[in-house]
Amino acid sequence: MGVYGDAKKQNTFDAIVIGSGISGGWAAKELCDHGLKTLVLERGKDVRHIKDYPTATKDPWEFKHRLEVPSTIRKENPILDRCYAFSEATAHFFVKDNEHPYIQEKPFDWIRGYQVGGKSLLWARATQRWSRFDFEGPARDGYAVDWPIRYEDLAPWYSHVEKFAGISGNRDGLETLPDSEVLPPFDFNCTEKHIQQKINNRYKERHVIMGRCAHLSKPNEIHLQQNRGQCQARNKCDRGCPFGGYFSSNASTLPWAMKTGNLTLRPDSVVHSVIYDEQQGKATGVRVIDAHTKQMSEYFARIIFVNAACLNSNLILLNSTSHRFPNGLGNDNGLLGKYIAFHNYRGTIYASMDGFEDSYYFGRRPTMPMMPNFRNVYKQETDFLRGYMIHYSTSRGASWQGAAWKDGIGADWKNSLTGLGGWGVFMMMQGETIPKEKNHVRLDTDKKDAWGIPLLVTSVDYDDNDEKVLKDFHEQGAEMLANAGCSNIRTNDSQQAPGLDIHEMGGVRMGLDPKTSLLNKWNQLHHCKNVFVTDGACMTSTSTQNPSLTFMAITARAANHAVGELKKANL
Ligand SMILES: Cc1cc2nc3c(=O)[nH]c(=O)nc-3n(C[C@H](O)[C@H](O)[C@H](O)COP(=O)(O)OP(=O)(O)OC[C@H]3O[C@@H](n4cnc5c(N)ncnc54)[C@H](O)[C@@H]3O)c2cc1C
């Protein structure tokens, strides 16, 4: 239903941001900081920092099922049940399978968090910059399309978001993983250090460093201004942190934007589509369905940031049809929804480490040692494209884990339960996948969700390159652990479906040529310049690094460009 007169005025803002997760939070902060009256539309419920973290300080015995999700709920949610972070403590932040169905043409585990803050409440906070090799990769190796930006374009924006979000780590001086603006790092334990030294000594081009993560190991003034405090290394992060010790939209960007007086946050507002005005040749607003009453309304603005997370941003744009754009907003070349890529997480390795039984560690560190990609960095050197980064960690088992199942009675048996087991080693890969046209999402032509919006069809799969990357990780990882003195080395292929990595990217990719891409170098739709897409949907390729820090930097850069263009009356 159309909105006119005073009602239209009331529903009119300078900017609209769709989604309040990691990227939407950043768009809101930057636009509000520049004085733009900004409306953030979020389909999920409100989640206020601290107040709405019901499990944040609970101990395991305070949960009815000691953190286990009851089997009935697991059975009802087979997709979600495969996500490692789904527990009795976090269930309320995850989308349940049957509430928001989608159609898997090929297996795809779509993990979502529909609420104010999105998945920023749930994420694991690993935050590495991408390197020049990542942005040059597609052009050099001849896949996807060339990125319209290079590392240098993003470097100042990485600094900008890092200082505000707070990133813990070292300045490692690596070309393959550029330094961040860092707060003090977390420490290796003795066996992790041992493995690090063995690998660094033996392999010239392989570098083990402490993982960088979005935690306030030592808050700066800018973090105190956000009312955030030091990370307590409790590692209960995905329940929401009452200290604001890790970066989330709820603890950081949204309250900051709210303080400017320029933010209007509207939860329970499902964006249906972007409104395109044929006469003006631009987008004028969005159609919104109330999550509860299901009533449709319209909101208007001069610029629109689409930040609903990769696949939902694709869905909204595909659903934004008009006479000018019958196949979705900006979709003249038919590539909207195509070239979806993700991270290959299938490979893990387990091992034991003898010795060091006189040592232990303190606290629950929220990050792990890591090794940036060392494959095909300077030139093509294997029979597969690109490569993988590695995370590993070590920990000591507890003797009760085995003893509790053994027969026994009395003091000796009880004492045996409190002892420590040996050191175990865990290693995992994060492989780059190659964006391909056939890996796509589209709208189903019949089926609709409870809000009358077409269901998304996912058609995304692995390819031979992914199998080769996995094999190489298993060989190289096992070799490195053997050289570091590990024993009982076991490789594992989880065979998990794409999507469970929760790093989906693409579908609205950036590029130089409107014939082969949807967005320009400032994340504007080539054919509808006042619509910006700055979440995972915009990514031309996936790198081997975690993506969210790059979403933040790209969003801040695009938002500042948008403000400049508005001032010049170009939009
Ligand atoms: C368990 C877990 C671990 C992770 N670990 C890491 C990590 O270590 N490092 C890393 O870089 N990334 C990690 N990620 C991924 C990271 O969370 C995402 O990359 C990031 O949150 C994406 O930001 P976003 O703004 O695109 O989407 P989100 O944070 O998901 O926010 C999108 C928002 O849009 C809303 N929305 C969707 N559709 C609509 C609509 N139609 N109308 C209105 N609102 C809508 C959603 O409700 C949501 O609030 C992890 C994710 C999970 C779940």
Image (cartoon, rainbow, N blue to C red):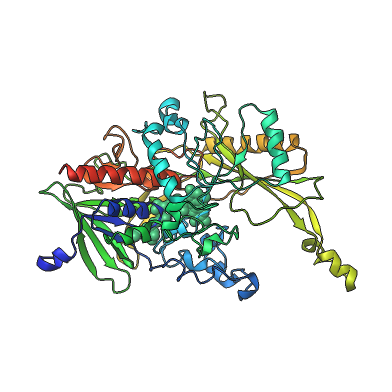
Residue in front for this viewpoint, 330 or 365: 365
Residue in front for this viewpoint, 105 or 472: 472
Q: Position of residue 326 (x, y in %)?
A: 21, 49
Relative to 347, is 133 on the left or the right? left
Q: Quadrant of ligand 1?
A: bottom left
Q: Position of residue 284 (x, y in %)?
A: 17, 54
Height in image: 150 above or below 125? above
Quadrant in the picture for the C terminus: top left
Relative to 186, is 141 on the left or the right? left
Q: Position of residue 34 (x, y in %)?
A: 26, 50
Query: Which residue does the image show at 62% across and 68% down from the upper left?
Result: 68
Query: Which residue does the image show at 52% across and 46% down from the upper left?
Result: 183
User: Is residue 107 something that shows in the picture?
Assistant: no
Query: Which residue does the image show at 52% across and 53% down from the upper left?
Result: 216
The image quarter in which residue 49 lies: bottom left
Quadrant in the picture for the N terminus: bottom left
Q: Position of residue 330 (x, y in %)?
A: 24, 44
Height in image: 12 above or below 502? below
Residue in front for this viewpoint, 216 or 489: 216
User: Is residue 81 something that shows in the picture?
Assistant: yes
Farthest residue toward the front? Answer: 221
Query: Which residue does the image show at 40% across and 47% down from the upper left?
Result: 552
The image quarter in which residue 452 lies: bottom left
How many numbered marks are there? 0
Height in image: 402 above or below 565? below
